[in-house]
Image (cartoon, rainbow, N blue to C red):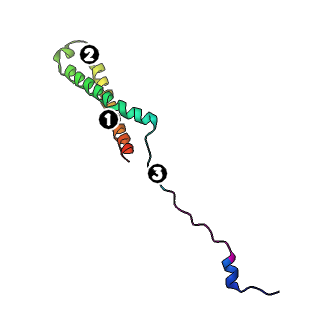
Amino acid sequence: MRQRPQAEAEETTPKPKEVRPKRERARKLSFNEKRELQELPPRIEAMEQEIETLHTRLADPELYKSAANDVSTAKQRLETLEAELENAYHRWQELESIASE
């Protein structure tokens, strides 16, 4: 029996397949995210209006003559609203960046 030359033996060995990197697909907004994006501007506007109302109320000297509980409640509500407003702006920006991709 005759042996093949070494070069021919190497040619018959299967070559490993090239691994292609997966393409990153542009992420789309889900149905719920689209709905949330549509609801955010009116929600933000309502929060801004309530914040403005609270600022006006806290600027009124009559509030401080009445029960002190009203003042602390108004201040707490203002702090909560400002934090919620900031979160809403961040979420809106996040959703807009996903939608624009």
- Give the extent of the magenta segment: 12-22
Q: Which numbered disc flags the more N-terminal residue, 1 or 2? A: 2
Residue assigned mark 3: 25
Quadrant position of the N terminus in the picture:
bottom right
- Element class at badge 3: loop
Tag count in the figure? 3
Magenta highlight: main SS: loop
Q: Which numbered disc flags the more N-terminal residue, 2 or 3? A: 3
- State the residue at coordinates (39%, 44%): 98
Q: Depth check: 44 or 85 in front?
A: 44
Crowd rating for badge 2 (residues with CA inside 10 Å; few <14, some 14–19, many 20+):
few
Residue assigned mark 2: 68
Circle on res. 86:
1
Locate residue 37 relative to residue 9 in the image: left or right: left
Image location (x, y in percent) of residue 57: 21, 19
Q: Depth check: 27 or 65 in front?
A: 27
Frontmost of labels 2 and 3 is 3
Image location (x, y in percent) of residue 55: 21, 24
Q: How far apart are labels 1 and 2 at the CA level? A: 28 Å
Q: Which numbered disc flags the more N-terminal residue, 3 or 1? A: 3
Q: Is residue 45 magenta?
A: no
- State the residue at coordinates (45%, 33%): 32
- Element class at badge 2: helix
Locate residue 71 relative to residue 14 in the image: left or right: left
- State the residue at coordinates (37%, 42%): 94
